[in-house]
Amino acid sequence: MEEHNTHCPYCGEPISLLIDCSIPEQHYVEDCQVCCSPILVGVTAGADCQIESVSVRQENE
Ligand SMILES: [Zn+2]
């Protein structure tokens, strides 16, 4: 698992995500640690557990 720091798309507060980088592509919902809103997280990872991109967006977008 890799820790990735980003910002909540709702409240803008810094949040940290724990990402299972052994999965090449994944999408999941994680509640913001600050405002508890459901964040849609999309992750792509390459070989050697290298996180290539992380996107966060609001559920209703
Ligand atoms: Zn938030």
Image: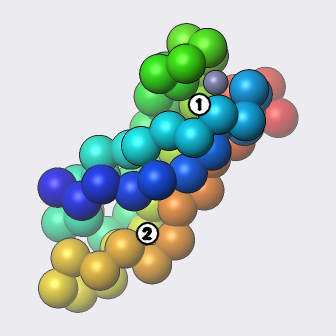
The answer for how far apart the CA atoms under marks 1 and 2 are is 16 Å
Quick one: which residue is furthest to the front in this view? 14
Quick one: which residue is furthest to the top in this view? 36
Q: Does 59 appear above or below 8?
A: above
Within 10 angstroms of label 2, few (less than 14), some, or many (20 or more) residues? some
Q: Secondary structure at mark 1?
A: strand
Quadrant of the image containing the C terminus: top right
- Residue 48 spot, x, y in % from top left: 17, 85
- Residue 15 spot, x, y in % from top left: 50, 38
Quarter occupied by residue 38: top right
Q: Does the residue tagged 2 have its C-beta within 8 Å of any atom of ligand 1?
A: no
Q: Residue at x 48, y 30 (%)?
A: 29
Q: Amino acid at mark 2?
A: Thr
**Camera-side mark, 1 or 2:** 1
Quarter occupied by residue 1: bottom left
The tag earlier along the polypeptide, 1 or 2, is 1
Q: Nearer the viewer, residue 15 or 40?
A: 15
Answer whether residue 42 is visible to the viewer in this image.
Answer: no
Q: Using the image, tell me which numbered label, if any, was put on residue 39.
A: 1
Q: Does 11 appear above or below 56?
A: above
Q: Using the image, tell me which numbered label, if any, was put on residue 44.
A: 2
Number of callouts: 2
Assign ligand 1 to one image quadrant: top right
Q: Secondary structure at mark 2?
A: strand
Q: Residue at x 45, y 60 (%)?
A: 43
Q: Going by the image, does 52 lie left or right of 10?
A: left
